Structure formats: C-alpha cells, structure tokens
Amino acid sequence: MIKITHIGTDPEFVVLDAEGNLASSIDFLPGTKETPFDLSNGTYVQVDNVMAEFCVPPTNSPKELWDALQYAKQAALQFLPAGYSFATIASAVYPDKLLDNPIAQVFGCEPDFTPYYPKGTLKNNGSNRITDLFAGGMRVNPKPNCADKNLRSCGGHIHLDYFDSICTIKDPTTLQRLTSTIILLCDLYLGIPSVLEDPDTNRRLLYGKPGSHRPKSYGLEYRVLSNYWLESLDMVTAIFERIKLIEKTLNSRITSISGGMINGYNDLYTHINSILSKFNINTIEDLDDIIVNNNTKVAGEICSFLEIKPLIKEKV
C-alpha cells in the first residue's frame, strides 16, 4: 500500500503596505533561502524575490497546517511596519522602484522537472499516450521567462511524504514510472481543479506548468498550484481530501509492493489511461491546454467525472 503520511507547504505571499499598495519583503523581513528565519513552533520565514515565503511543519491534518501558517504569518508581522499585511495574491505587476534590488531579479534558483515530453521529440517519438514514456526519465523545465519583467508570482507548492511506503522499490525504472504516475494524478486531482478555483491566470506565464515538481528524499514537491488554496481552512481541507483521493486511486489498483515489485501497477496504468482517453488527453500539449490555457470547460467535465467539487468564490 502506498501511504501519503504527511503533507507540507512552503507558500509565498504578497506584502501590502497600510494603504493596500504593493510592498517588498526585501526591505523588512529576515531570512534567506540559505538561512530561513526561525519563527519557532517549527515555522520559518524568508525573503523570496519581493515576496514573503513561509515554511510550516508537515502534517496529516488540514487544521494543523492552517493553524501553523496563521501562527507564522502573525509572528512575521513583527518585522513589518504597522498596518502592513501578507496577502493571498497569486501574481502582481510591481513598480520599478520595488524591483531595484538584485534579489528582486532572482527567479527559479533551482530547476524543477516534468515527466512529460512534447509530442514528436526524441523521448516521445510521436507517441499518442502521455504515459508511454514514464520510464524515460524527467525533463528539466526551462527557467521562467515572461515578457512583462515586472510580473512576480506566488506559489503554493505541496510537499507529499510517501517514500517510506515505496522504499523497497530499488529498480530505478520502476520507481521512475510510479513517481511519474503520482505526478500525473496530482495534475488530475489538484492541478485541473485549480483552473476552476484560482482566478489568477498570469502566474502560469511564469510557473505552474503541468507536471512541475522537484524530487525529495521523502517523496516530491508538486509545484503547479499558486497560493490560492491557502486563503481559507475550507480550501486547505479540500486539498487534503483530494490528496486522499490520489492515495485511494493508487491503492485501488496496486495490491502490494513486495520484493521491490509493484503488484497491480498495470491495472492502475490502464485505469489512468482510460480517464485520459475519455477526455482526449494524449500529450503534454493537451494538459497545457487545460491547465496553462485555463480551459474551464474541460476542467469542469473532468472534475465532475472524478467527483471533485471545486470551491469557487462567489462573485461580488
């Protein structure tokens, strides 16, 4: 059985001044990528470009994650002037005066990866199934490049701890194939619903392409979502529930992992491909059309089929 034991996050937030205008975290907050500032209770803060980035302890409880994040944000307010705040905004265009610092020009210090290859490339050889080359290794995503050099964005990356439940798998090809499948399920159960829930479309010009992740010693960091899901406890709870659906989908077909082998994987593979085929998702370009290009029609159909109820804010 594959068990996702803990879920973590290291989200970024926009800093606003007392009048609600954009401000830069560089001017106020302690902590760097190399040395985050300890806020106690297992939480940290650091400067990330002009944003404030937080880290909270991994947990299996949405309420614990929510409470830890609220504690961290409240503790970090001591470093901001009176009236300043942290805002759950996925992207913003900053004035030049706030970007006149080398730190504000740093993007994507470490590469992230995707299991998908464009159709017609050497790795994909014209295949018409996105899963056909999951054993072929990961592709490095290019560094973000946007025509608007003043656009900055906030991630709400999700860290999944599951490696202990698959650590007996020693064959790198088998492990690669399973990891890629988990990432694809994250796109189906997390990335595609976000198209309906996240009103921001500019962040995906920089980040959030399908399959974006970093491998971790405990599992993986799924990097597709913005910080939108951290606006309310209801949304955090919904994300946790969808991750449980990912776990349920895996274990509904995988009967056991023993002797380094996955029993039932082919059934899982067939099941996932049946979902993809139903919605004509054959290549990375098809996933891009849904997630990057915000195809809400197909996203809604997939959510309905997977019995995911998006949490959509009422328009005022």
Image (tube, rainbow, N blue to C red):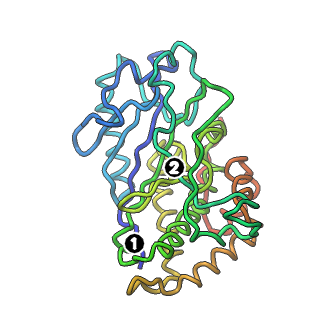
Residue type at tag 2:
Asp
Q: Secondary structure at mark 1?
A: loop
Seen in the image, is 182 located left or right of residue 259?
A: right
Residue type at tag 1:
Lys
What is the C-alpha distance between the residues marked 1 and 2?
24 Å
Residue 118 is situated, as x and y percent measured from the top left of the image, at 71, 57
Residue drawn at x 69%, y 64% as measured from the top left:
302
Residue 242 is situated, as x and y percent measured from the top left of the image, at 52, 63
Observer-nearest residue: 176 or 88?
A: 176
Observer-nearest residue: 93 or 143?
A: 143
Quadrant housing the C terminus: top right
Residue found at the very far front of the displayed protein: 122
Seen in the image, is 270 located left or right of residue 186?
A: right
Residue drawn at x 33%, y 57% as measured from the top left:
59
Residue 193 is situated, as x and y percent measured from the top left of the image, at 62, 55
Mark 1 highlights which residue? 3
Residue drawn at x 62%, y 49% as measured from the top left:
209
Looking at the rendered image, the disc whose residue lies closer to the viewer, 1 or 2, is 2
Residue 229 drawn above or below residue 108 = below
Mark 2 highlights which residue? 112
Q: Secondary structure at mark 2?
A: loop
Quadrant housing the N terminus: bottom left
Seen in the image, is 206 located left or right of residue 124?
A: left
